[in-house]
Image (cartoon, rainbow, N blue to C red):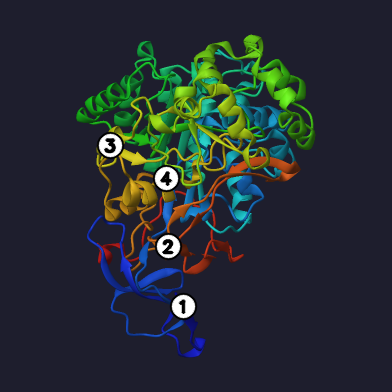
């Protein structure tokens, strides 16, 4: 691929992408043509006669909209990081953060540490990194938006008002598990949320799952919130929407049967006239099966509600490593004795045959394990049939032959020894894949139909979060590589549909009508992709957050260019240093949307 420049004075456009195969985000069939860009917007699509300051030859490449990831947790990172990796490495040009009820505004000064603890426990983001990186230039939520607006980035960011922060702000020290707010508390929380949406928040988020706890092990504030509290907040969002805002109510929940979650979700959506979206998963924490979740959602939608299921694209779980957050031997006494040592000292022990024999001869000591999720702990430490070896060309839809159990049997060794040796490979940097969620059937067939449903949306990447356990910020690349190009164990998804799912569909749910499609008048957020070369790289653990905080990262090859608002932000996988991205405040409209439609 080549690009060349013309003299700026004679240019009709700032940039023209020539001869590419355009997949425009609408779901329509691909076509060959040019895309002209001027002043950050798409100016023309088809055969473009004018010249440009810069031109890109996209012959044989896919030209697609920038991806819109609506489920991320960059709430802290977005205040100090301009590159916004790893999401920006995977064709993402817009993220929505503040999901699952956790975030950093509103925030009274005496609650900063509490909010960091909550984020660290729920989303596995190192607290030391957050404490060093966040400068706390705000107290109220509108002031947080102002702080976000000051820092230009490679991508656009939008956010929810998080329930945990709102509850902590209003209840103060009364915010304990099971705390019941007064009517005045609920009224104050509702005002804060309404003010936040009026200031530009794209919605409100909460969490109601035992899997989400602070680092001290306390349930997140939304877990025990009553329907009355949540509906009152929903009404406040509806008022803000009427005043010109955009409001999505986002939730993660265990969906316990006695909670009747879909009853109040449906009522909230109908009364406030806003979409409600929830994490729909095969999960051992959810009492409702995935089929029941979808059926109950659709029953409410048939009655006038607008509930949308957020679905993941692959098995959600854990990438286990010695230096990660968890691994199969974390409850062995020998590991506990070296757990706090520097890595080089740990590694010397782990590679010592005598230490290995000692550790493998021990039983797990679960006395310090969280008993309410002991089922998960048991899968982590003993579920060899559900854990998979991550080869260099690892397939994220592995069959039983790739399991630790199967490969250990083939090698004639005990599964725990095989797992230990896997983690010790490549100088102690080996990985084991454990899909705790979304892999109950041992395949991803159930997701194929859901990806073609209008009441679901591709989501749950958790970009910026679960730093020591997953790197699902790579989900947009996985969608293209696995579901479109290389899936072996079932039906694939067309490229046109895949692009629409992670650009236009996600943008529209959050009121961003100005992006996600390649047409005149829309934001010039564009990817130029070499589908033949598109491939996820091997994960690695980096220690590049503030205070040397760790995070699992994964790059990809095949993204020739990523363009944000007409500016090239990434070329051949490398950040250009450009920062055309900003803060999204409220709903967005395309300047020439009517003509493009």
Quadrant location, the N terminus: bottom left
Q: Which of the two marks, 1 or 4, is nearer to us in this view? A: 1
C-alpha distance separating marks 1 and 3: 39 Å
**Disc nearer the start of the sequence (1/3):** 1
Q: Which of the two marks, 4 or 2, is nearer to us in this view? A: 2
C-alpha distance separating marks 4 and 2: 29 Å
Which numbered marker is on residue 450?
3
**Disc nearer the start of the sequence (3/2):** 3
Give the residue pinned by disc 2.
527
Say if 16 sits above or below 409 in the image.
below
C-alpha distance separating marks 3 and 4: 29 Å
Q: Nearest the camera: 73 or 547?
A: 547
Quadrant location, the C terminus: bottom left
Q: Is residue 338 left or right of residue 475?
A: right
Helix, strand or loop under label 2: strand
Give the residue pinned by disc 1.
2
Question: In the displayed image of the protein, which residue is found farthest to the front?
Answer: 412
Name which residue lies at 25% across and 41% down: 454
Q: Are marks 1 and 4 in contact (CB under 8 Å)?
A: no
Q: Which of the two marks, 1 or 2, is nearer to us in this view? A: 1
C-alpha distance separating marks 1 and 2: 15 Å
Residue 564 appearing in the image = no
Give the residue pinned by disc 4.
245
**Disc nearer the start of the sequence (1/4):** 1
**Disc nearer the start of the sequence (3/4):** 4
């Amino acid at each position: 691929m080549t690009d060349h420049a013309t003299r700026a004075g004679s240019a009709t456009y700032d940039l023209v992408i020539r001869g590419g195969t355009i997949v425009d985000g609408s779901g329509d069939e691909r076509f060959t043509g040019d895309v002209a860009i001027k002043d950050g917007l798409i100016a023309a699509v088809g055969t473009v006669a004018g010249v440009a300051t810069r031109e890109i030859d996209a012959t044989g490449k896919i030209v697609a909209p920038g991806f819109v990831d609506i489920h991320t947790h960059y709430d802290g990172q977005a205040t100090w990081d301009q590159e916004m990796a790893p999401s920006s490495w995977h064709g993402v040009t817009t993220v929505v953060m503040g999901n699952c009820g956790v975030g950093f505004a509103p925030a009274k000064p005496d609650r900063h540490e509490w909010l960091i603890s909550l984020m660290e426990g729920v989303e596995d983001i190192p607290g030391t990194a957050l404490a060093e990186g966040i400068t706390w230039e705000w107290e109220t939520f509108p002031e947080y938006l102002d702080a976000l607006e000051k820092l230009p980035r490679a991508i656009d960011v939008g956010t929810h008002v998080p329930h945990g922060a709102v509850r902590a702000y209003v209840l103060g020290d009364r915010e304990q598990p099971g705390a019941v707010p007064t009517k005045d508390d609920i009224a104050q929380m509702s005002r804060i949320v309404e003010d936040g949406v009026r200031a530009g928040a794209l919605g409100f988020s909460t969490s109601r799952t035992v899997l989400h706890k602070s680092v001290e092990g306390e349930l997140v504030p939304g877990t025990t919130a009553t329907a009355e509290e949540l509906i009152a907040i929903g009404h406040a969002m509806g008022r803000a929407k009427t005043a010109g805002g955009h409001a999505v109510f986002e939730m993660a929940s265990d969906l316990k049967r006695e909670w009747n979650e879909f009853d109040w979700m449906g009522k909230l959506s109908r009364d406030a006239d806003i979409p409600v979206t929830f994490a729909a998963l095969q999960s051992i924490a959810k009492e409702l099966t995935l089929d029941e979740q979808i059926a109950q959602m659709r029953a409410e939608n048939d009655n006038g509600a607008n509930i949308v299921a957020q679905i993941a694209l692959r098995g959600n779980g854990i990438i286990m490593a010695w230096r990660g957050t968890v691994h199969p031997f974390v409850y062995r006494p020998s590991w506990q004795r070296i757990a706090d040592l520097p890595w080089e000292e740990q590694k010397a022990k782990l590679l010592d045959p005598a230490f290995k024999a000692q550790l493998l001869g021990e039983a797990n000591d679960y006395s310090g394990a969280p008993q309410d999720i002991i089922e998960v702990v048991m899968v982590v430490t003993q579920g060899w049939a559900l854990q998979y070896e991550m080869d260099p060309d690892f397939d994220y839809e592995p069959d039983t032959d790739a399991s630790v159990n199967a490969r250990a049997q083939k090698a004639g060794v005990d599964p725990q020894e095989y797992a230990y040796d896997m983690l010790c490979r490549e100088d102690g940097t080996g990985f084991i894949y454990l899909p705790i969620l979304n892999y109950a059937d041992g395949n991803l067939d159930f997701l194929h139909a859901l990806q073609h449903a209008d009441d679901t949306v591709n989501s749950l990447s958790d970009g910026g979060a679960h730093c020591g356990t997953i790197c699902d910020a790579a989900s947009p690349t996985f969608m293209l590589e696995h579901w479109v190009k290389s899936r072996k164990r079932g039906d694939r998804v067309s490229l046109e549909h895949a692009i629409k799912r992670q650009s236009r569909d996600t943008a529209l749910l959050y009121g961003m009508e100005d992006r996600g499609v390649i047409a005149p008048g829309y934001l010039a957020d564009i990817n130029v992709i070499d589908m033949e070369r598109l491939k996820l790289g091997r994960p690695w653990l980096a220690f590049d957050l503030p205070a040397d905080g760790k995070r699992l990262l994964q790059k990809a090859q095949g993204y020739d260019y990523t363009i944000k608002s007409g500016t090239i932000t990434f070329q051949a996988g490398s950040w250009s240093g450009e920062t055309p991205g900003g803060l999204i405040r409220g709903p967005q409209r395309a300047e020439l949307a009517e003509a493009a439609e």
